[in-house]
Amino acid sequence: MKEICKSIRKKDHDPKIEGRSVYVDDYVTTADGREILTGRLLHSKFAKARVLGVKLPELPDGYTYVDASDIPGDNNVNIVLDDTPVFCRDTVEYIGEPIGMLVGPDKTVVDRLLAEIEVTYEELEPVLDIRTADESFFNYEFGHGDVEKAFAEADKVYEEEFLTGYQDQTYLEPQGMMAEPEADGRMFVHGSLQCAYYVHGAVARALGTGPDGVHILQDVTGGGFGGKEDFPSIIGCQVAVAAKKVGKPVRCVFDRREDLEFTPKRHPSLCKYKVAVKDGRVTAVDADVRFNAGGYSTLSAVVLQRGIIAAPGVYDIPNVHVTGKAVKTNTNPCGAYRGFGAPQTFFAMEMMMSHIAQDLGEDSIAFKERHFVKQGDTTSTNGKYHFPVPVPAMLGEIDALCDLRKKHIEYRKPQTGRYRRGIGFSAVFHGAGFTGSGERDLIKATAKLRKYADGTVEVLASNGDIGQGVRTTFPKIVAHELNIPFERVYYNHPDTARVPDSGPTVASRSLMIVGELLRRAAIKLRDIWQEGVEQEVEEHYKEPDFMIPFYLDRFEGDAYPTYAWATSAVEVEVDTFTGLVNILGAYGSFDVGTPVDYNIVVGQMEGGFLQGLGYASIEKMDYDGKGRIRNNSFTDYLVPTSMDVPNMKAVMHVEEYPDGPYGAKGAGELPLVAPPPAYIEAVEMALGGAKVHPLNRIPFSTEDVILEWNKEVL
Amino acid sequence: MNGINFKLNGKDVCYEGAATERLLDVLRDDYELKSVKCGCKEGECGACAVLIDGVLTNSCCVAMGAVDGHEIVTVEGYRETARFAKLSEKFAELSAVQCGFCIPGMILAAEAILSVNPHPTEDEVREGLSGNICRCTGYNAIVNAVLNAAKEGDGLW
Amino acid sequence: MVNGYKPATLQEAIAIRSREKVIPYAGGTDVMVRRPEGVPFLFLNDIDELKQIKDDGEYIRIGAAVTFTEGLKSDLVPAVMKEAVSRIAAPAIRNAGTFGGNLGNGSDKADSVMAGFALDGRVRLVSVSGERILPLGEFCIRRGVTAIRDDELIAEILLPKKNCDLPYYYKKIGGRNALAISRVAIGGVYSVKDGVIEQFTAAFIGGGNVCKRFEEIEATIIGKTVDEVKANAEEYVNAYAESMTFTRGRVSAEYRKTVIMNLLKDFIQTING
């Protein structure tokens, strides 16, 4: 193991474990001692309606109602497109859409007054069905080869539909933001967030101040997983508009039900796959991918892009055609969640490969193995896998952990009795960093190091620690290159008033992209280091020379410079009396390049792996015929506890990436992508295989197991 | 009876508000004990767990009247102890703290396990932590940290 | 105490209860989630008489304010009850939640109540005008509705000793391995002498809008030989299914029905003797 991999005590360990870290809800007053008012949102009760009027109760002194008419700037939240409003326009497009905010000193009084507000609506017919929704925010199409010819010449053509449900990020700290008008006229907005500069752009626009009129600080953030990528921009604008109106600090913290029901989640999807097989080999994939975007477009464009690029999986397929649609429905807008569109398509493709193999009478691991991409192969977008693809070796690693290949054949044989076993396998990648030329054209990351006269060094970057450890790993890289003690390098939570824009905390990019900028900056600083004086160095992102330029209009070129890889196996025992699925073991081999801090990376792998298992099994969330999410409490939206998957093992495989710091690649998202198809293949195998019980959706609950099992019994 | 009298982190206190108030809100708002986190207010996540007479309890599900005559410990009252130091050291060694929001509750859950069972099995630790949701770690690091604390904390518990 | 009463004895508690509208508060785990406003709480959590577990020769008597954790530590509490209680939520909830609260809040998913049914348990209610002992089947009317009067408090759960050491069956199916509400649960006890079933109970969560036993079906099983019952298991299971109403909630009616029937069959097949 390289020196840089050795684990160290995390910088935020002590304050967090001692309960001293200040999360946004923990401020008693502002730093300068001012009282903080509570803001609570008035949410739409209908999925689609015209808002005719809002009748307020008599508001006591100090209580204020805020809505779109109070916005000094522009009522469009700066996300990808401009359609998401700060507060609703004439219509509401989903249940929960913010109509206004009630602000005042006493939380209880605010809640009471909020309940007394009468909104009159003219109800309109909502669009709720992903299949029939005809408006789409985004439509993409791309491919390579000659798909039609391949289908015409195929021995057999397979068609299947795959469905995936919502998944909620379920960070333990709910969404929360706070705005403080400052004496110099600037608006200071801070809270639980991933992307300080996204919030910065959004708030400046809503207030109409220009970029210098606001600054944004990330507070200690209790988890994000993508859920705090775009949404803090929205609440940030809302509290800023409210604070501007009342001239006082305003904080809005969601309660859990509000958070589960009204904040972005993973897009439900419907994927239709058509696959041609000739001489036992897949010759063409035609994938029609539909994501349910919800009422506004928010991040759907980029989520969909990542999803469709991954549509052919980790396989070398000569002819590919992919269409992708993000359809509008009158439901909660979906957004970013670890994996970012890819878990949906990987699930579809992995299950498709398994089902084809089963039909051909071949073990699906062997079948997949024959199709694995390798270094030099072409990607779905006519880019190139520039670096070695370690998937075959990683398959070997999990085979060694759980005797995968043997069990995979053994459990296929007919089983009897109440308890049935299965084991499933999956192989996935995660494209490292932003999709396409985003890093080069949009983000243009800058990172700085400031050395003070006392020899301490501060990292200046905008990437937030959301639990993934960048407050530790960034200083670790810098200390390593400067050859100074780790204690002398520190990285505070970013405030846009004092840090450059090194980009958002998304896309598993922070360590790989910004970590590398910091490594280079540290080398620069080392070269000019002078004792006793303050010095500053800066580094800018440069696209690696080997990249094949990406054109989004054609989906052509290298969508990613490199890829993180995972193989996983999940072994289950299914109780056919009750539908309970006992996970006997869950095993993953992960290649995220060099782990810059082994424990931190293993923690990412294990945490993501468990989220993926939850996504496949117990994490069920849906909306009813009126468009209302019913699973809006922790009683009804279940995530895994410490007792659910006691035997989960993650091992690291290291395939170094020359342009990442010490060989590191993106890590955070990868582990979530792998488990769903492995879990479903295992359950399907236990139930007798795809010929009798083909499974093609997640989550697949205990109830689903029984209803599926009954199909044979009836 | 007038106020609600109880011991909070070793000090005698008297709460004059309503007996129906939530302990969670009172700890955070009146006593400014911000280690006690609000994750759901329904007893389903454990972020607000405290020790009442040494017993792990979700403070969101406790009304103030019920704590009259009892002793409450939050992480603010626990973090100076040798037991805490041992747990913290073991959590640090495995980087078991990620976002940190579940951690104060998790630490008190660990104390509650070890105070009645100084040498728990892995299953016992997992059961003892099962009411404390952690979304970041997948639990392995936390469970192993508690087991390591038990192993090396001989005599502390 | 503002907006609350904390009596030291049961006598004081029922006096307050008879005088004014209060919400009995034992463990808080349910009442604090619903958190009704404007009504004072009557705190029962420190009343010594309600915190006892006793053996009076005929019954194991579990005080209403005994927590699940305390019940699990007691040698007197029967195994089927312990198994049911050990699967409730998670430690922090079991440390606070009580036997009386589980019964009093009228939940149709109350695990300890279901086990109480399986043991043919009773509830002792007290008020200033005296006390009543009701079989659980009379106390639990439907979801959210019990037979308790406005002036009464639950004092004890009574579990007939003759049932407490019998072999039992218990299975709970929740949404995950901890912190899970029963979607379906089944518990029962039985005794066999010379191959003939002398005692048989089966109680259910998920087979209607209340925890329930079906004594008329039990009566058709009692007196038969084990072999006969096993041979005709299908018939008994069907009789149960016909008596139950399966409702849709967190899971479908079909799921509940299938699982209850499967588990009941399993129960019957596992009868020893």
Image: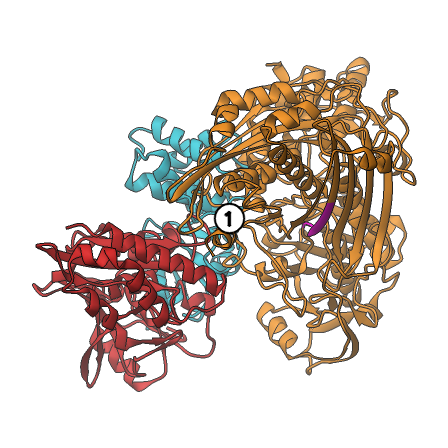
Which quarter of the rendered picture does the N terminus of chain A lie within? top right
**Chain painted in orange in the figure:** A
Residue displayed at 71% across by 16% down: A481
Could you tell me how many numbered marks the image carries?
1
Residue displayed at 77% across by 34% down: A154
Q: Whole-percent x and y of residue A542?
A: 87, 25
Q: Whole-percent x and y of residue B36?
A: 49, 51
Label 1 resides on the chain identified as: B
Q: Secondary structure at mark 1?
A: loop
- Nearer to me, C105 or B62: C105
Q: Is residue A321 magenta?
A: no
Q: Whole-percent x and y of residue A594?
A: 66, 20
Q: Is C31 positioned to the left or the right of A692 in the image?
A: left
Residue displayed at 42% across by 49% down: C178
Q: Report whether residue A452 is seen.
A: no
Q: Which residue is mark 1?
A: B35
Please, is residue B112 above or below residue C248 in the view?
above
Q: Is A319 positioned to the left or the right of B2 in the image?
A: right
**Chain painted in red in the figure:** C
Q: Whole-percent x and y of residue A651?
A: 55, 24
Which amino acid does the dot numbered 1 rest on?
A: Ser
**Chain painted in cyan in the figure:** B
Query: What is the crowding at mark 1: few (fewer than 14 residues within 10 Å), some, or many (at least 20)?
Result: many
Please, is residue A119 above or below residue A406 in the view?
below
Q: Which residues are magenta?
A: A266-272
- Nearer to me, A477 or A228: A228
Please, is residue A376 above or below residue C2 in the view?
above
Please, is residue A204 above or below residue B68 in the view?
above
- Nearer to me, A150 or A524: A150
Residue A656 falls in which quadrant of the image? top right
